[in-house]
Amino acid sequence: MKKLLSVLLALSMLAALPLLSSAEEEKVLNIFSWDGYVDYASVIQPFEQQTGIKVNYAPFSTNDEMFKKLQENGASEYDLVIASDYILNTARLEGLMLPLDKEQLPNFANLDERFISQYFDPDNEYVVPYMSGIPLIVYNPDMVQIEIDGFEDLWDPSLADSIGLIDDARVSIGMVLLSMGQSMNTTDDAVLAQAKEKLFALRENIHVLEYENLHNSLISGDISVAYTFTPYVALALDANPNLQVVWPKEGLGFGIDGAFIPANAPHPDNAHTFLNYLLDGQVAAVTAEWQYYCTPNAAAQEFLSDAYKNNPVFNGIYDRFGDAEYVMNLGADESKFQDIWTEFKLLF
């Protein structure tokens, strides 16, 4: 499917890309994001071939690493950055973003209105939403004695040494807070102390902590339950359609990754050209199917495969925004979560 989409994309860009211009700039675009978050063969290479713009892709490991790098170089080294919503908000407030020139982004109109005007860019001046996802519970009913319908079930004694949990302080402690009926973003010391105690009580049920690829442990049978990110839930379902996906009754964590142009980008027009390219409906469809995330691009829907649209992970997200909560940047209070998580990991 990915190869077919790549071919169709290349053909469609023959007509679309000549409409995109990049003024008199050097034919270079410097992108800064996670490793592999924009696929070369299906997305970057067709863009290079049709525009003559050479794309240099520099990876970072964490949002904090990206933010510090922009601060150090005065937001002048890269032309385009793709990162998580909470750090987007911080970068905007710090003045590290260049306002978007909407005249160069006619495809901005392709975005689903539910994904724009978010807290990290309320007036849609700086950020182009790129991908979206919700961490979910997925489990193998053949290996689990109970029916799981929420976070609270993860503490059931029958699940001893059988759960894979996301190795991330904010996401996993946030899950514990949701199970308590609290906000994922609380900074109340008494509430966090209760969450710490409850998290530590979950230790005996956890088999592995891992940020990515928990689906492999679920597919192999090494674990029977995983709390993991959208693409890994979808990949697990591809391998075993009998797995059960749980939209936890206590609520959901939600995230949008977005792209922005740094304030002193050396090639801002090239960045606009690439952003408008990403916003093309067919390009957005290819990107979504490659990354296995939810696309915020309404125009992509007609190009998405039936397999993608029928996947219960993707066809359920759009109806559940009202139950979801962003992980916010808590500033100095962020250390409260990190300290709890550091202690928790010492138990392994």
Image: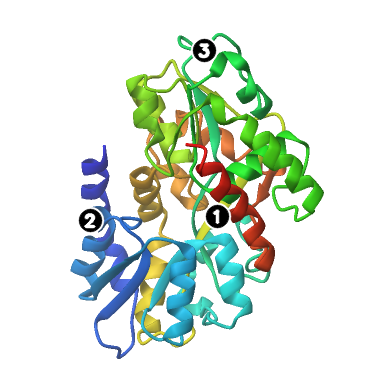
Res 262 seen here: no
Choose mark 3 or mark 1, whichever is in front.
3
Q: Residue at x 54, y 40 (%)?
A: 135
Residue 26 image position (x, y, % from top left): 25, 87
Choose mark 2 or mark 3, whichever is in front.
3
Dot 3 or dot 1, earlier in sequence: 3
Q: Which sits in the foreground, 20 or 270?
A: 270
Q: Residue at x 60, y 47 (%)?
A: 254
Dot 2 or dot 3, earlier in sequence: 2
Residue highlighted by disc 1 = 256
Identified by mark 3, the residue type is Val
Residue highlighted by disc 2 = 10
Screen quadrant of the N terminus: top left
Residue highlighted by disc 3 = 144
| Secondary structure under the numbered disc 3 in the rendered image | loop
Neighbourhood count class around disc 2 (C-alpha, 10 Å): few under 14, some 14–19, many 20 upward: some
Residue 154 image position (x, y, % from top left): 61, 25
Q: Residue at x 70, y 37 (%)?
A: 197
Colouring chosen for the image of the structure: rainbow
Identified by mark 2, the residue type is Ala
